[in-house]
Image (spheres, grey):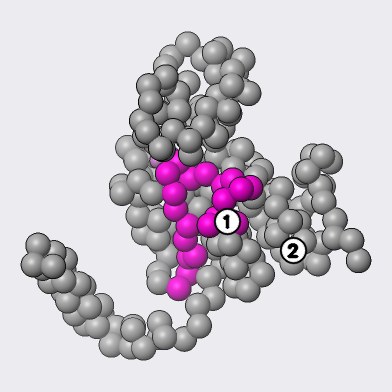
């Protein structure tokens, strides 16, 4: 623990700073959380999810993994979504990728990186499926950026294809699913305009209904 003393020091400084600005800050955090947004983003250490969209503690429910994937076999992200939708009643689910994503880059190359390759295989599948569009982009940086965007679009649809989101829509609980990309070079967000707010926007193959 001795090695991490600096972090505890930082923590005490942060508490002091917060209390100087707002003496009731921590007291207020003890009430139930009521976030309006679920953030599904990359684990990349350069992305400060709350800060880049100006949200304070209690305002953003967060799930992060390598390359911001949302897979129908991953109980971790599925549980986060279910809890966020059914219990916290978030209004918006945001899938946020980022340009310069190492996970997406690895998925474009043919070298092995160990266990993580199995996780990133999902992006490799997107590469294969969108080969025609990607191959038509001559500039390799632009091609890489487009794959970052396509990955976000696919994950956005994966969220919409869950029974969690579709059941919420069926009971008229408003939920919109958004796809964004964060640009670390400028700090700005790029809205991919792929927002989905209802079952009508979903391909018929992926529509499901509860049997009563
Ligand atoms: Co990343």
Instruction: Identify the residue shown where x is 43% and y is 65%.
Output: 55
Residue 76 percent location from the top left of the image: 53, 57
Report if residue 91 is visible in the image.
no
Residue 160 percent location from the top left of the image: 69, 49
- CB contact under 8 Å: marks 1 and 2: no
Mark 1 lies on a secondary structure that is: helix
- Nearer the viewer's eye, disc 1 or disc 2? 1
Q: Which mark is residue 75?
A: 1
Using the rendered view, name the quadrant where residue 93 is placed.
bottom right
Q: Which mark is residue 26?
A: none
Considering only vertical position in the picture, is 127 above or below 96?
Answer: above
Check if residue 43 falls in the magenta segment: no
Residue 117 percent location from the top left of the image: 44, 33
Report if residue 65 is visible in the image.
yes
Instruction: Identify the residue shown where x is 50% and y is 77%.
Output: 33
Count residues near mark 1 (Cα–Cα under 10 Å), then give few for <14, some for 14-19, many for 20+.
few
Image quarter hosting the N terminus? bottom left
- Numbered range of the magenta stretch: 58-78
Residue 88 percent location from the top left of the image: 59, 72
Q: Is residue 110 left or right of residue 164?
A: left
Q: Which mark is residue 168?
A: 2
- Quadrant observed for ligand 1 in the rendered image: top left
Count residues near mark 2 (Cα–Cα under 10 Å), then give few for <14, some for 14-19, many for 20+.
some
Check if residue 73 falls in the magenta segment: yes
Earlier in the chain: of badge 1 and badge 2, it is 1
Instruction: Identify the residue shown where x is 44% and y is 53%.
Output: 64
Q: Is residue 4 left or right of residue 162?
A: left
Considering only vertical position in the picture, is 169 above or below 95?
Answer: below
């Amino acid at each position: 623990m001795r090695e991490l003393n600096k972090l505890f020091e930082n923590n005490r400084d942060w508490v002091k700073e917060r209390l100087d600005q707002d003496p009731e800050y921590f007291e207020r955090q003890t009430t139930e959380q009521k976030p309006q947004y679920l953030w599904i983003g990359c684990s990349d250490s350069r992305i400060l999810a709350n800060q880049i969209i100006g949200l304070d503690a209690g305002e953003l429910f967060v799930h992060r993994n390598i390359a911001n994937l949302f897979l129908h076999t991953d109980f971790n992200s599925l549980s986060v979504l279910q809890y966020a939708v059914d219990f916290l009643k978030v209004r918006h689910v945001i899938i946020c990728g980022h340009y310069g994503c190492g996970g997406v880059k690895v998925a474009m190359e043919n070298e092995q990186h160990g266990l993580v390759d199995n996780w990133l295989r999902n992006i490799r599948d997107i590469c294969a499926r969108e080969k025609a569009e990607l191959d038509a982009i001559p500039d390799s940086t632009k091609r890489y950026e487009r794959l970052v965007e396509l990955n976000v679009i696919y994950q956005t649809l994966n969220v919409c294809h869950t029974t969690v989101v579709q059941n919420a829509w069926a009971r008229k609980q408003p939920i919109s699913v958004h796809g964004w990309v964060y640009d670390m070079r400028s700090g700005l967000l790029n809205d991919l305009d792929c927002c989905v707010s209802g079952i009508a926007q979903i391909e018929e193959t992926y529509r499901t209904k509860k049997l009563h």
